[in-house]
Each structure stands twice: as C-alpha cells, then as structure tokens.
Image: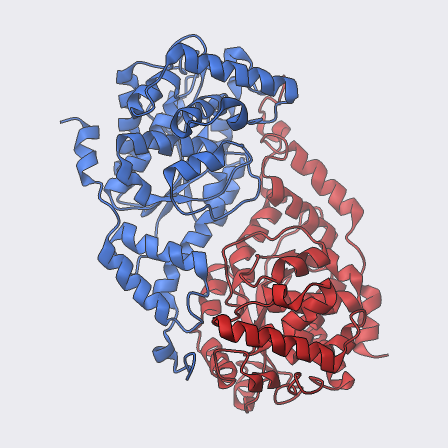
Chain colours: A red, B blue
Amino acid sequence: MNLLEGTLPKIFPQDHAARLKAKERLEQLVMPYWALAELMDLAVDLAGMTRNPRPEFAGKVIVVMAADHGVTAEKVSKYPGAVTAQMVHSFVRGQAGINLLAAQAGADVIVVDMGVNADLLHLADEGKIINKKVGLGTGNIARGPAMSVAMARRSVESGIEIANLLGPQYDLFGTGDMGIGNTTSSTAIAALCTGGDVAVLTGRGTGLNDVELTHKVSVIRRILEINRPNPKNGLDMLSKVGGFEIGGIAGLILGAAAQGKPVVIDGFIATAGALIAARIEPFIRDYLIFSHRSAEPGHQAMQETLGCRRPLLDLGLRLGEGSGAALAMPLVSSAAALLSRVATFAEAAVSEAGE
Amino acid sequence: MNLLEGTLPKIFPQDHAARLKAKERLEQLVMPYWALAELMDLAVDLAGMTRNPRPEFAGKVIVVMAADHGVTAEKVSKYPGAVTAQMVHSFVRGQAGINLLAAQAGADVIVVDMGVNADLLHLADEGKIINKKVGLGTGNIARGPAMSVAMARRSVESGIEIANLLGPQYDLFGTGDMGIGNTTSSTAIAALCTGGDVAVLTGRGTGLNDVELTHKVSVIRRILEINRPNPKNGLDMLSKVGGFEIGGIAGLILGAAAQGKPVVIDGFIATAGALIAARIEPFIRDYLIFSHRSAEPGHQAMQETLGCRRPLLDLGLRLGEGSGAALAMPLVSSAAALLSRVATFAEAAVSEAGE
C-alpha cells in the first residue's frame, strides 16, 4: 500500500471522552466560569486531538518547507526566485525571522528542501536541512500544470515522511514555508476551495504596488482557466496550481493528524496546504490550530472554509517562514498547561460563586 | 517633596532618536518590508520607551495588586468578598491561573496587599507578599466615597514605591489585579473617562445573569450620582469611586514610566488604573502596551480613550490577575528580539526586492 493510503485510515476525529474530561476540570479551576475563554476552548481541543485530558508538549518544531515556483516568470513577486535558496541558507545560519521566533517559543526549526531551484545537497549532507526535493521548482502554472500527479503525490508523501521522521521527538508541529511566488499558487487554491472572486482574494504578497497587484490578479485568472483544477480533488489541485512546499505542508498535516498531534498552521501558504490536506482527508481539520490571520485578503475566507476556531493572533503578519506559528506556540503551551498546572476550587479551598 | 510630585517630572514621551534607529534597522531585516507588521510597530515603541534601539528584557514581573471593595454589599458580584483574601493565598501557593501563565512567560509574580479585608501580615512577614495595605477594603461607593483623598494618594504612591523597589531587578512590568467587586469601580471610572453610557459599558464581571447585570448598571449609576467625581482629576476619581488596587496599578504605571520601562496592561481593571494614571500624567500613555481586549464591553472604549496601539490579543479573557499581560509577554519579548537577533539583507547576503 502507498504511504498516503496507509496514513488516511489512521486519522480520526478528536476524542470526545478526553474533551469531556478536560472540560470538566477547566470548569472547576479556581477562577470564574470559563474566564480564560478561547484559551480554554483551545485546551479542550488539545485534549481531544491528543486523546489525553492533560496533554503536555515537550518537543515543539517548526517545519519550514521550501520550494521554487515557475510562475515567477510572470513577474508576480517583488523578489527574484533566487531568494528562495538564499533564504534557506539564512535559515541554516540562524539569521532569519523564524530562527528568532522559534527560539523564543522553545521550538526547533527543521528546514526541508521540497523543490528549491538550486543544488542544496551539501546542506543535506551536513544534516542542516532535509532533502525531499521533488524537482527544481514547479512548472509555470500560467502556461500549464505545476507538476505531474505523481509528483503531487510524492510532495504529499514526503510531508508525511517528515511527520513520521520527527514524530518520536516532537509532539507539537508548526508549519512554515519559503518559496518566492507561492502566494500566487495559494491564491489559486483559495479561489478554488472558497469559491471566492480572485480579485477579492488576491493580496500584495511580499509588497506589490497597485499595478503589480492588478497584473497578479490577471495571471491567477489565467492560471485557473488554463489548468481547470478539480476543487474537490486535492492531488489534482496540487498538481495543476500547487507548489512542492504546499504539498509538503499538506503531507505534514496528514502525518501529524495520523499521530494525533496538533499542527499550528502559520499563514496564507500554510492554509493553502491545509485546504489541500482537507480535500484528501476532511478529518484533518480536527488537528489544526490557526495561529493568526494574515494580511493577505483571502486568508479569512480560507480559514472559514476549513471551519476551525478563529485564529489566535491578528497582527497583520505576512512573512511566512512559520513566523505566525512560532508566535502562537506559547499560547498553545499555556492552554495545555491550564489542564495540569492550575488548582480547582476544591484543591485551593476557595469559595465558589453564590456560596 | 512628595513621591508623586517627585516622580511626574521624570516621565517623558518616547525617545524619537531610538525609535528612528529601530525603524531603520527593522526596514533592513532579511524579510519583505514590515512583514511582521504590528510586531514591528511594537518593537519601535519598545525602543522609544527604553531609549534603546536594541532593548532586551531580562527581568519580567507581573505585579498583582489585591484589595477589597465595600460595594460588594450591593451584591454586584457573584463571589463573596472573602474570595479576595482566599485568592491571595492561592497566588502565594502557586495554584492560580496567573502563577502558571507567568511561569510560561518567564515572569515572576509579586503579590501586593493594597487593602485586602483580612489580616495578611504573616504572609508579608514571610516575604510572600508585599504589604502596602491602605485600609481594610474601600467604603461602599454606592453610599459615599471609596476613600479619602489622602488614601488615594497613598495608594498611588504605594504603586510608585513598588515600581521603584522592583526596578533594579525588572525591566518589563505587567499589571495584575485581584479584588471582588472591582469591575464595578472600573466601570464607573470607564464611564467618567470615556463619557460612555453606563448601560453600554457595564459587563458581567465574574458571570452575572441578566437580572444581576441590570442591577449592577443601576448601582453604578447611583455611584456616579452620589459621588460626582471630577473626570479630569485622577486622585478625585480614585478617592470617590476607585479601589486601593486600582490606585496601586496607577502608581505602578507612573513609577515604571518614570524609569523608562514598558508596562504590559492586563484587562479591564488594569485599564481603569491606566486611565487614573493618565489623568495624573498624560505622558504615561507612551509606556503602555495593551495585552488584550477583555470580554467586558467597556474595555474597547477605555483603550481607545487612552489612544495606544490596539491590543495584542483578543481571546475573550475576563480573569484578571494579570493573566492577559502574562499571555502577551512572549510577544513583547519577541518584538524586542527582532531588533537584536535577526540579520539584515546585507548581513545575510540575500537579494533585495526589485534587484
């Protein structure tokens, strides 16, 4: 059996009994009823995901999936494609935003070459990145498909392999991405999955001006017309308008969900990966934690389509790299710790309401 | 000279030169322009507050000010007044929400008895709390003033003393509160400072039902009619409708601002303290960081009256204790670290936009 087909049957909805036990304890904590509101909702979710009424997260990791995009030939980004590989080097040297933010969250950073258009084998040989290269960047999706269906499957299965590889060390995953041009792919996926208008969903990515934004909208419309992806088929969408890193993120989510581990979803690109994963296995939505609402206008519609709880942060972030996931991880840890490290009214001998 | 009058001349607006230097560096970080958005805005503020373009926060503290309120005789809270002292014991034993959340943020918890209606001297003697007791709870503000003007001054000066005492150890302050009945005082202050309608501003506090909420609104209206506080005079408002812990928070803010140190403001009660402080010295607003938007309906209007940046979190919290401040502290640390621990494009040798 293939890795993908072997993984899907292991993905179940959240555990109701663990949720119920967590909720019962939270209701008795030495504070007014549900006074920590959405943090408590999250704590119940974490219990349900992990099937443990008192979950703890000892190992945290941000997995940064990197790949290039042929669509950069259409001038949809302010930055040249070469920046993808340059940023991988920055991640490896610990110089980038995600290095700092993950360190602040007590999370490791694992960089995966899903399809960077550069020879990075020396970094993999030195153990500084993981090599899962599916190709040297995708095809230009404004002129044809991003990749073959076999390559789409390989991207997703590589993500599952990463989740399985990291499973013994980590119990909380965060997604990250690096790929110049990948907001274009992600917006196409957003349009397919939300049914929204491309002009409304498309954003400035790394900082386009008005003229460049209008151009990006027309390129994304052409991408959808030429490729005609099936919005109900995750691998079809991925092969036609996706990216290798987006497939990798989808696979990471599937692999984590199969282990009963929560995945903190970063921003716009990561949510596109989650939409692909959800078209492959809808139950994965029970394992997603939205870290933030990005500045990209399509993000809210994508999050609402997935239908999970509203994001933890809303700071106008648009960096990617896993930065939002890292910033939200301390909130996730705190939510979990509510279940094991706060006393109940009875334990603390404090009078309850109305006594 | 009194401590209060001696402190005010040390409070200056943020330092423009440090802000400018911080902004220049942030613009060169190896990421798209201002991609971390509100986190970067906060980093610039931190530079301006500390007068240091690369601030670091080694010592973090949540100061929990506790006091009782005579207005609990009017049945404005679901909990009996005795809970204030019981919760102080829970804080000391490390059993409460704030203990966990502060620990997650790497912050110490300092508990101050500003006016709890119980003998807590043994805890002070054992060094577990700081004794600044101004009285055994305030007067019932539905029937007269909370305290004398001298006591109001003493509350505020006690807060300044706490800031000065903790100054050598801590460079990032967070406010916390414990005081059954204190949303009633805080709503009265909110109505005075925002000009808003009491019925709109009043919330359910620790969990009132509709009938109890209507009663609370009528009590707050009576409080304002009977006391007629001057909304332009912080000490007058505090003496008439305040609380000892609200005065303590106001003083802590004044003392921190005089040291050029940021104060992470918790929720509804802390913001009432900030409003009192701002009526005493408007420049303090340059040192406030709003941690979150509380579930209390008046909170947004209070925050907008103070006019600082919008809050970092919006999770429906309504616990107090400093819980929101603790949850936001990791974001503050991360914002500061952007200035010292991320490379610039030149340092990382990555191509810039449009190259």
- Give the total of numbered labels: 0
Determine if residue B267 is in view. no
Residue B245 location in percent, x, y? 39, 26
User: Looking at the figure, which quarter contains the C terminus of chain B?
Assistant: bottom left
Residue A279 location in percent, x, y? 78, 67
* A159 relative position to B113: left or right: right
Front one among A74 and B208: A74
Q: Residue furthest right?
A: A1
> Looking at the image, is A214 positioned above or below residue B140?
below
Front one among A93 and A195: A195
Residue A236 placement: quadrant: bottom right
* A143 relative position to B329: left or right: right
Q: Residue furthest top?
A: B143
Residue B217 location in percent, x, y? 54, 18
Q: Residue at x 18, y 29 (%)?
A: B5
> Looking at the image, is B202 positioned above or below residue A122?
above
> Looking at the image, is B173 positioned above or below residue A247?
above
Residue A58 location in percent, x, y? 59, 58
Front one among B315 and B199: B199
* B332 relative position to B233: left or right: right
User: Looking at the figure, which quarter contains the N terminus of chain B?
Assistant: top left
Q: Residue at x 66, y 80 (%)?
A: A244
Residue A140 placement: quadrant: bottom right
Residue A265 placement: quadrant: bottom right
Q: Residue at x 62, y 67 (%)?
A: A199
Q: Residue at x 74, y 56 (%)?
A: A286
Q: Residue furthest left?
A: B1
Determine if residue A4 is in view. yes
Front one among B242 and B115: B242
